[in-house]
Amino acid sequence: MRTTISLPEPLLENAKQLAAERGTTLSAIVEVAVRNLVLAQDPVSSAPPFRLHTVRGKLVTAGLDLDRSSALIVADDEAAFRSHRR
């Protein structure tokens, strides 16, 4: 299939020189470049990369079972109750 593309002159000259050195065509060089550099990459995700934020120190209560959400609710309620009593 034929198509027309525009390349900056220095890039075109470098690609032609590479094709001559390898004994191949300019079309083959462009095909390999597009296939390897563009099509082989993972598709661009619209979501930003996930970053896990961790903390250490006083933010987690020792002995709190994080696998039970009810334990988290109870701990939150107890903390709120203690702060209102003061």
Image (cartoon, rainbow, N blue to C red):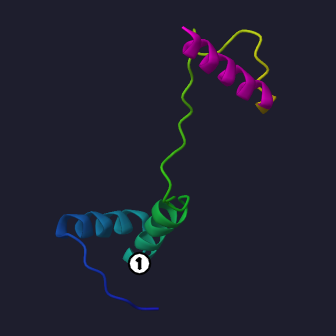
Nearest the eye: 65 or 3 = 65
Over which residues does the magenta segment extend? 70-86
Q: Residue at x 35, y 63 (%)?
A: 18
Q: Is residue 20 above or below residue 27?
A: above
Q: Position of residue 34 (x, y in %)?
A: 45, 68
- Whether residue 72 appears in magenta in the rendering, the answer is yes
Q: Position of residue 64 (x, y in %)?
A: 76, 16
Q: Taking 83 as reference, is 68 left or right?
A: right
Q: Is residue 74 above or below residue 7?
A: above
Circle 1 residues within 10 Å: few <14, some 14–19, many ≥20: few
- Give the quarter of the image for residue 69: top right
Q: Position of residue 39 (x, y in %)?
A: 52, 67
Q: Residue at x 48, y 59 (%)?
A: 46
- Give the quarter of the image for residue 50: top right
SS for callout 1: helix
Q: Residue at x 81, y 29 (%)?
A: 68
Q: Residue at x 46, y 60 (%)?
A: 37
Q: Taking 43 as reference, is 8 left or right?
A: left
Number of labels in the image equals 1
Residue located beneath label 1 in the image: 27
- Give the quarter of the image for residue 76: top right
- Whether residue 26 appears in magenta in the rendering, the answer is no
Q: Amino acid at mark 1?
A: Ser
Q: Is residue 73 above or below residue 30?
A: above
Secondary structure mostly seen in the magenta stretch: helix
Farthest residue to the left: give it.
Answer: 9
Query: Which quadrant is home to the C terminus?
Result: top right
